[in-house]
Image (tube, rainbow, N blue to C red):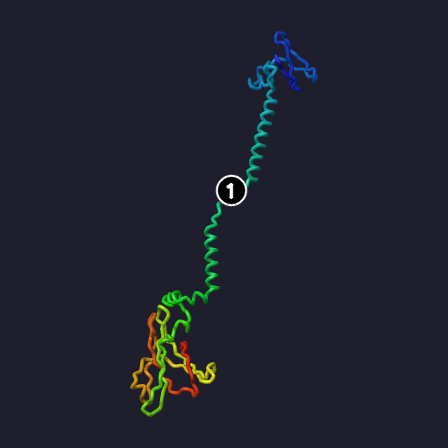
């Protein structure tokens, strides 16, 4: 039977056939009874008796090994937690298409603004914007005096004075209603064609008949206000005072 010293816990193997009443430990020198106290709790009474299996580990070694195993598990868990902290979370997938279209729109608008004068010269664009009642400034280039329709003649009045009658056609180049411009007449010298002699501006009026032009004093008809979209209007201009030495003249639309 294997017993242990109650003082130093040294295991001692004794023969159960020998009736011993007292035993002295060779390690610590304490004397104790080899028989267990029957009055003790059964669990406590046999707590110091070990199995005769010599290959079995004592309980405290098993507990220690178990504790070490638990410690290893704890360290494993801790290391796994630390490793998990070192692993960066997965990033959300980036969506670049909205940013690409936004940048493209900004570049397009910036380019359009830089070419503002160019696209404002587009007649279709100007007509559309004006029809949408956007505040666009009027332009003289929105009108065209047709050169092939311009004619001039001298008319003798009933008082033997003469006036220059200039007829022609002006066209609204936009597909929107526009206010009529004035017509600017510039007279050039007969001897020096590049030298302007005088300039005058006259409104576009209703057409006057030949009889009213020949009368003195001449009463000018009412001025026209607005031209319809893409319309062409015939006009007659009466010039009562022409500079001396005039050889030629030019007509240009001028905004009122």
Please indicate, yes or no, whether residue 223 appears anywhere in the rendered image: no
Residue 253 screen position, x and y as percent: 40, 76
Residue 3 screen position, x and y as percent: 62, 15
Taking the spot 44% from the left edge, 83% from the top edge, the residue there is 188
**Quarter residue 147 falls in:** bottom left
Residue 96 appears left or right of 215: right
Residue 255 screen position, x and y as percent: 41, 76
Q: Is residue 107 above or below residue 223?
A: above
Q: In this view, does 84 lie above or below 12?
A: below
| Furthest residue in direction front, as rendered | 191
103 or 125: which is nearer to us?
125
Taking the spot 66% from the left edge, 13% from the top edge, the residue there is 23
Q: Quadrant of the C terminus?
A: bottom left
Q: Is residue 132 above or below residue 20?
A: below
Q: Name the residue under label 1.
A: 90
Q: In this view, does 154 lie above or below 229?
A: below
Q: Is mark 1 on a helix, strand or loop?
A: loop
Bin the neighbour count of mark 1 within 10 Å (Cα to Cα): few under 14, some 14-19, many 20 and up: few
Residue 243 screen position, x and y as percent: 42, 87
């Amino acid at each position: 039977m294997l017993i242990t010293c109650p003082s130093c816990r040294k295991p001692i193997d004794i023969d159960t056939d020998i009736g011993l009443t007292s035993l002295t430990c060779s390690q610590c020198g304490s004397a104790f009874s080899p028989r267990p106290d029957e009055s003790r709790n059964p669990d406590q009474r046999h707590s110091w008796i070990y199995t005769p299996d010599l290959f079995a580990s004592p309980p405290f070694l098993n507990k220690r090994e178990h504790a070490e195993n638990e410690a290893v598990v704890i360290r494993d868990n801790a290391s796994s937690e630390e490793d998990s902290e070192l692993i960066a979370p997965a990033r959300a997938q980036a969506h670049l298409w909205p940013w690409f279209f936004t940048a493209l729109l900004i570049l397009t608008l910036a380019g359009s603004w830089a070419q503002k004068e160019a696209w404002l010269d587009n007649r279709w664009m100007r007509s559309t914007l004006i029809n949408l009642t956007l505040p666009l400034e009027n332009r003289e280039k929105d009108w065209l005096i047709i050169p092939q329709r311009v004619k001039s003649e001298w008319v003798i009045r009933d008082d033997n004075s003469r006036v220059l009658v200039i007829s022609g056609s002006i066209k609204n180049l936009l597909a929107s209603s526009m206010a009529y411009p004035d017509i600017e007449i510039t007279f050039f010298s007969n001897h020096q064609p590049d030298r302007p002699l005088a300039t005058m501006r006259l409104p576009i009026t209703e057409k006057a008949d030949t009889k009213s032009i020949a009368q003195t004093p001449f009463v000018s008809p009412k001025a026209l206000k607005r031209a319809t979209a893409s319309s062409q209007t015939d006009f007659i201009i009466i010039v009562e005072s022409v500079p001396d030495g005039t050889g030629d003249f030019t007509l240009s639309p001028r905004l009122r």
